[in-house]
Image (cartoon, rainbow, N blue to C red):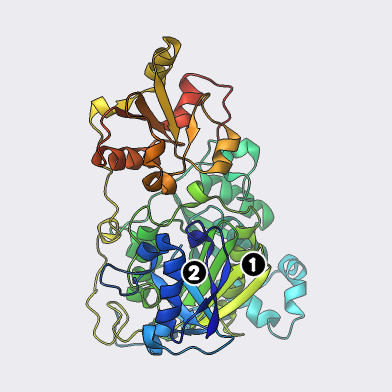
Amino acid sequence: MSVKVSLPTALRRYAAESDTLQVEGRTVGEALARLVERYPDLQRHLFTEEGRLRHFVNVYLNDEDVRYLQELETPVKEGDEITIVPSVAGGNGRAPSQQRLSTISERAEAVQLSPEEILRYSRHLIMPEVTMDGQRRLKAARVLIVGAGGLGSPLTLYLAAAGVGRIGIVDFDVVDFTNLQRQVLYTTHDVGQSKVQKAKERLQAINPHVVVETYETRLTSANALEILREYDVIVDGTDNFPTRYLVNDACVLLGKPNVYGSIFRFEGQASVFSAERGPCYRCLYPEPPPPGLVPSCAEGGVLGVLPGIIGAIQANETIKLILGRGEPLIGRLLLFDAWRMQFRTLKVRKDPQCPICGERPTIRELIDYEEFCGVTPEPVLAEELEITPRQLKERLDRGEPVFLLDVREPQEWQIAHLPGATLIPMNRIPASLHELPTTDEIVVYCKTGGRSAQVLRFLYNAGFRRIKNLKGGIDRWAVEVDPSVPRY
């Protein structure tokens, strides 16, 4: 029985960059077994050591999650499609969702639109789905965006233009040159300045009728409930798993809808999690992937227009929730592939065993999310296992035999590399040990030193002793030794 398997961008590097494959099998489990036989590196990403599907990977047969069918024993038929979808970051006796909606309605009754606002929003007002009543709801609404980056940029722009009355933004970062390729909220002149402050200026320039609240802080378990409590809808524009689970749990405990979006390379996801009306993020992904298993956008890259598309979808979902009209993505996961220009919608079910929104919740307060996601400080390398760029330059100038091992990806190598270096990407190291010298000292480097430190530990455990990690990577080399080396 031949079935089609669709691989997400994050896993294609382990399958010779294939996006779809045909495999044989009578069940989902057999089909995945054939897939792993063909590409063994996929094994650790899909299955535990006991052979069970990992909790941070969802497998769909057509549009149904196999967890709610017969799991790996689910039978397949000719022409079926298996889609692998990995993760890419309380109550008070009265239904919180009803309380939220009535609060918007009550505020909307007291809201008036000025002649200037009527002209500004006229293309909304003539729509029977919006009208004056709907625009007053938008003006009365309070929306919080967590993250003012790639997703937060289009989100805030469209919500401000649409007339959402109060917009809160949480972010503690400053604008960087590398943001400008996709974060359209900022300009070159904003580099080095506070994101939330520049965002506030830009949004109020677009629409002076909008109140913008800024929270220049990291969202944590200590402040999340206090910040989120004041808003009707929460929009997740985060880029890391600890904050994503924190936002989800805080929304469930407060009874707030969570408009979710995520991006990686040229693929995006979007959904609306609402614990009273449907599943939450934990229902979809009960556990995060181990640290380092899923590359970040800084490591894997992202197509500049992608956050604009996904962010606009999140803005659209937010507006529908405020208006109380249309069909929001509750119980559905939208997948978008910009490279193939394909949209797919998969079903997401509420998990009765979910630890926070299930029938017997065990999470009743916010937890330590960095610990939950396994995010711990990297073990500090012993001083003798590190070398600074200046120290390396001195050795090279003296003509000492040094084997420079670049463990980045080929596309990073094309941007810049150290003269005389050898490129062996990180995921190829285990199969390439025979290419490494046993006499010369090996200096391992990557962009900033993180990936190379992992490779160094692997090589040390494999018996290599004359090895060092370039501290700060090629980026620090460009700053301290050779400014002509491009930074990225």
**Does the image show residue 272?**
yes
- Residue in view at x 30 percent, y 73 percent: 51
Residue 426 location in percent, x, y?
42, 45
Instruction: Report the quarter where the C terminus lies.
Output: top right
The residue lying furthest to the front in this view is: 434
Q: Marks 1/2: CA distance?
A: 21 Å
- Residue in view at x 73 percent, y 70 percent: 121
- Residue 141 higher or lower than 441, as above or below: below
Tag 2, which secondary structure? strand
Label 1 crowding class (10 Å Cα cut-off): few <14, some 14-19, many 20+? many
Residue 161 location in percent, x, y?
67, 63
Residue designated by label 1? 163
Residue designated by label 2? 260
Amino acid on which disc 1 is placed: Gly
Amino acid on which disc 2 is placed: Tyr
Q: In front here: 148 or 289?
A: 289
